[in-house]
Amino acid sequence: MNAVIAGLGITEMGKVYGRTAPEFAADAVRLAVDDAGLALADVDGLLTNTGITGDVGLGLQRDLGLRDLRLLSEVQAYGSSAGAMVQYAAMAVMSGMASVVACVFADAPLKEPGAGAGAAYAGLTTTGWRGLAAASGIYSANTMYALAARRHMRTYGTTSEQLGHIAVAQRAWAALNPLAQMRDPITLADHQSSRWIAEPFHLLDCCLVSNGGVAVIVTTADRAADLNQPPVRILGWAQTHPGNDEQLGLVSGAAISGPAALKMAGATIADIDVAELYDCYTFTALLSLEDYGFCAKGEGGPFAASGALGPGGSLAVNTGGGQLSSYYMWGMTPLSEAVVQARGQGGDRQAPRNDLVLVSGNGGLLDHHSTLILSAR
């Protein structure tokens, strides 16, 4: 019995004000159910994940009016959660624990200008070890990932310009995506002149912030056979949680979860047609490219600079624009675009080959990683 993704729901995305994360989550599930050609009453499993605000949880069942669920849980592995949810949902439907499982992420951190955004953090203090790090200027994901990127640069000679090629390539994909928040083309010069966030990261090295929600419906291939959409088969999956700071900036969990997921799918990295990579920063995408084996270790910079990643390149990567230019929904950003590509519904941005699609999720400071191998065949 095979598990498939049968429905995809994406709400309005970006600077969308006046709505809560639970409202976005409920709408995303309804959209995904409708996309599949099912009814809400068919859903007997619900897995939730929330982002910065932490507002989406088990109460979503009541918001949706779902009854007698056979599976209900909150999943938290940060940016790797979407991949993990699909893995758990696949195991649930394959075992008979549930028959139709909705997996959803939603967040609403953006506030309307003048509405007091950030006020909740005005009195925030940090103590203990984190306080010591904060006193040294290391107080956010930006600064921690900047340290990781700098280590890679010093070890392998990776440059800011090479990171910039990733941002430029993904913006070129976003220009073809009607759902993307940022669609105006950028040049390498634009990247280099954008303001510093935390060296070596310019503004255009960093992901967007978005309000919205995304959901997918996981069921069995038999159940999906008569539904609205071409089923996207979940051929392989794996996750890993390295817990190894000694390799920070040099190796990510993709080096472990990638081969494991590919083995389960009976494939190799050379078989992958489309790669939807978690890209909270350009560097995260670069490191994942190396660790999955799309290029040799330390060669991610030259690979990106070669022009391989954009439209018309040798490897279709983050074809919707990714989190850098499309929208930031944690691991649901790469997953949602992977479903679109596997279905062949990408329109102007559709990759020429889509037999096998790799999806990566990354969480924490390269602490958590998930991988999915999807196919519409």
Image: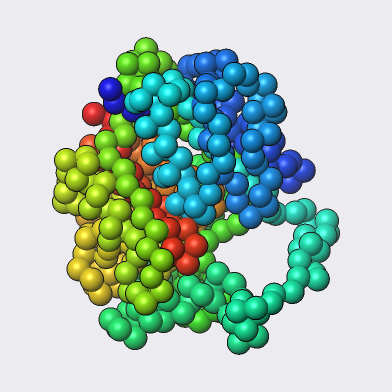
240 or 192, which is in the foreground? 240
Q: Is residue 52 above or below residue 147?
A: above
Q: Is residue 92 above or below residue 288?
A: above
Q: How is the image coloured?
A: rainbow
Q: Is residue 78 above or below residue 24?
A: below
Say whether residue 284 is left or right of residue 270: right
Q: Is residue 219 visible?
A: no
Residue 324 is situated, as x and y percent measured from the top left of the image, at 49, 59
Name the residue: 46% across, 44% down.
82
Q: Is residue 57 visible?
A: yes
73 or 330, which is in the foreground? 73
Q: Is residue 10 above or below residue 151?
A: above
Name the residue: 30% across, 73% down.
301
Q: The N terminus lies in which quarter of the figure?
A: top left
The answer to which image quadrant residue 372 occupies is top left
Say whether residue 194 is left or right of residue 274: right
Name the residue: 44% across, 63% down.
367
The answer to which image quadrant residue 151 occupies is bottom left
